[in-house]
Image (spheres, coloured by chain):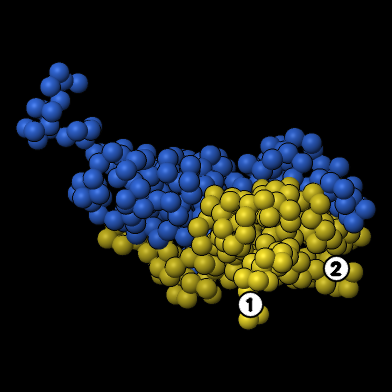
Chain colours: A yellow, B blue
Amino acid sequence: MTDHPRAERRRGRPRHTVLTPQRITDAAMKIIQARGAKALTMAALARELGVSVSALYNHAPSKHAVLLRVQDRLNSEIDCSGFGHLPWDAALARWARSYLEVYARHVELIPTMAVLPVANAPHTLRMYEAVASGLVAAGFARDEVVNMIVVLESLLFGSAYDATAPGGLFEPGELEELAPTFTSAVDARTGDPAEGARQAFELGLETLLDGFRARLGA
Amino acid sequence: MTDHPRAERRRGRPRHTVLTPQRITDAAMKIIQARGAKALTMAALARELGVSVSALYNHAPSKHAVLLRVQDRLNSEIDCSGFGHLPWDAALARWARSYLEVYARHVELIPTMAVLPVANAPHTLRMYEAVASGLVAAGFARDEVVNMIVVLESLLFGSAYDATAPGGLFEPGELEELAPTFTSAVDARTGDPAEGARQAFELGLETLLDGFRARLGA
């Protein structure tokens, strides 16, 4: 801070903190979390940052570039540490659980991130390289590897929604008589929604890993 | 139409077509598809329908009630016809493929529908009853049934995004040297994005069904 902000500004000092990639990414995530991905425009982002649109364009060439940085930020938080150290299936499970944990904190970003091309996102590419290398080293065919990754990502994106669903998601309300068997199945499940979501994800993950192990043995 | 709209209106004739559940549901889906779920408010819906908010409230008690009708509309399109006729696994596969097909046409609705309580949605409850009855009749334990449904739904919600992703989703761009093994795996996959998404979903579905069959035998 200065005692003479106006005088400083006249000398060319920016009115706000310098635009850094970090600040731009923070602001973009804030807009998407609060108002959804369709609300993220370069104009809205400039407004959020308190700068002109042209100033923003000097630091981020496009909305796509901003989204890539968001994707890269999120994916840099995913734990790939098992690959090269643990058995492939333990490494894959650690990666998938961590990936779920990151996106369950950011479900608003899933619709955008799930379909965003990964080109030129360094953390994202390093993550996929770790997973693909681990699977190829384990003996999986190259043409299976991407489908295996996509299956696990599909499961965990869906599970991230489930992990954030309210309690009583499957309660039938006043129409129980339409669904007596389903209602008894719901009643037989744990009552804690977070625990139910965790159990369902683990069922999916373990079942897929069993199947992948069987393919490797075949 | 009448030659004297003003006179007609004074006699109490509504200015617009009568509000039906069908029209309200159509308009709600249109808003979510175009502007995202956060844009759906009772005020926005009334505007879209060309009626006052109070007129809308006479036909739909809440935004939640509107969303339930949207969910019920979508889920009424899902093919449950296999249960009670085909073997449980063939019925489950038909249901899951049809469910994916419906939501791949409406990915914008996934974030809302995946976490919307099903209470008082008759088509949705009938769908779950068909699935749960099929699985219980096949011999699955009641406390497994909901987790099995959740796993398949998670996979297919995630796969619906993948089915709508652009081509070249996994191309590394200018950073190929960061991910040589992953890039070779991407190159080994089919080039058609729709076919790639289909293959990945089928890998997930078949692997899960194999695992469920093994649980039933155990």
Spatial CA distance of label 1 from label 2 is 55 Å
Say which residue appears at 48% left-offset and 49% top-offset.
B36
Query: Are there few (<14), some (14-19), or many (20+) residues within 10 Å of tag 1?
Result: few
Say which residue appears at 68% left-offset and 71% top-offset.
A8
Q: Quadrant of residue A103?
A: bottom right
Residue B3 is left or right of residue A175, and the answer is: left
Looking at the picture, tell me which residue is in the foreground, A215 or A200. A200
Is any part of residue A43 visible from this angle? yes
Residue B147 is left or right of residue B172, and the answer is: left
Q: Amino acid at mark 2?
A: Phe
Percent across and percent down for residue B136 are 47, 58
Q: Amino acid at mark 1?
A: His
Quickly name the residue at label 1: A4
Say which residue appears at 61% left-offset and 62% top-offset.
A49
Query: Do the residues at pointers 1 and 2 share their chain?
Result: yes
Percent across and percent down for residue A70 are 69, 60
Chain designation of label 2: A
Chain designation of label 1: A
Say which residue appears at 42% left-offset and 44% top-offset.
B31
Looking at the picture, tell me which residue is in the foreground, A116 or A212. A116
Q: Which mark is residue A83?
A: 2
Looking at the picture, tell me which residue is in the foreground, A191 or A215. A191
Image height of A203 relative to A112, above or below? below
Q: Earlier in the sequence, mark 1 or mark 2?
A: 1
